[in-house]
Amino acid sequence: MTARKNLFRHKFPYDLQGTEPLFIEAMRDNCVFQYENCPEYKRILDGCGFSPYNIQTMEDVQNIPPLPTLFFKRHRLTAIPENRMLIKATSSGTGGRQSFVGFDNTGMLCGLDMVLTMGKTHGLFSKMPANYVILGYKPHKGNNTAVTKTAFGSTFFAPALKRVYALKYENGSYKADIEGVANALVKFEKQPFPVRFMGFPSYTYFMLKLLAERGIRLRLPKGSRLFLGGGWKQFYTEAVEKTVIYEMAEEYLGIPETAITEFFGAAEHPILYTDCDNHHFHIPIYSRVFIRDPADLSVLPTGSVGLVNLVTPMTLGMPLLSVMTDDLGIIHQADECGCGISSPYLEIIGRTGVKGIKTCAAGAEDILNDSGKR
């Protein structure tokens, strides 16, 4: 797995062309490993007529049968014993089902290399201690969701003085405490340390809306930053444009748009996509993104709208090589952005109903059912 290690240690996170041979080799190594160590995945690939040993080109990579995220909510596929997984997590399970994801030790080291490189590239790290406001879940022993672990992990970009959470676990369930967040911010404004926010756009908006309703206009210390991650999920009817949050953050927190960073990712695709100065998600070397026609799963040309297929060789713990989301997206050429990053960027434009996603995994479902694996 040398190719995977070298790929994730590469110094330039957007050098897609220069790292393409490494990426293809890492994908082949990983796909072979999954094929030889995950019997269910072997049956899926065999059923789709795909041989991992023949992966030689990027076209071969895009021909790896994509498995939809819904598939992982119904099936627990692993290539190594769960007791050898350094970290285990689940998806948020908004629709009632959760995906289980597990990471091998070397995969986690690859992830650490990725975070360090992306953090340095996008200026996420600071030696200055900061107060953190997590607009998401407070960690709890019964909460293994990836989004909670990721949000907590983000509090290590700068030394944490205090962590305040918008969602607290009380009496067996999580309850929102936006009022408590607003009160904490009034205190933080008087301190010399910057404030770093991390969390869902929905709760960020609710916090800003509360400040507006109470007529509170804060000027947080220099160096304060706002990080956004995740979608609106059950609050989709209240979703607003990103520009609304940018404007409100400056008006009510004193945080300019230049200090706002958004992340994109999925529990089933643990790659860190960090937006550029123009708020676009350029594709890093650790992954590839294909846009597929919902009708026949063919890869669509740049600029076309289709299903978002996320590809990475990062983890050996599970066959997460090629994952189909229920997001609709477009791939844009790098020069359409103008920020200077050389890789294309992904624009997420909406979601499709999971019932409409038909992939080779529809056949995989039958393959697993026929073998009695549920």
Image (spheres, grey):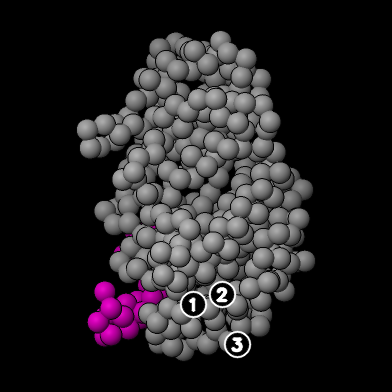
Q: Residue at x 68, y 31 (%)?
A: 127
Tell me where residue 278 sits by quadrant: top right
Query: Where is residue 270 drawn, in percent x and y?
Result: 52, 57
Query: Where is residue 206 drawn, in percent x and y?
Result: 40, 27
Q: Residue at x 36, y 32 (%)?
A: 167
Q: Which residue has dot 2 on it?
A: 30
Mark 3 residue element:
helix
What's the amino acid at mark 2?
Asn
CA distance separating discs 3 and 1: 14 Å
Whether residue 244 is visible: no
Q: Which residue has dot 3 on it?
A: 54
- Magenta residues, start to end: 352-374
Pick the front one: 216 or 150 = 150
Mark 1 residue element:
helix
Check the image and report above or below for 331 versus 219.
below
Task: Rate crowding at label 1 as few (under 14), some (14 to 19) or many (20 or more) other CA atoms within 10 Å.
Answer: many
Tell me where residue 82 sits by quadrant: bottom left
Check the image and report above or below for 209 versus 337.
above
Q: Which residue has dot 1 on it?
A: 34
What's the amino acid at mark 3?
Asn
Q: Residue at x 26, y 85 (%)?
A: 370
Q: Residue at x 71, y 59 (%)?
A: 9
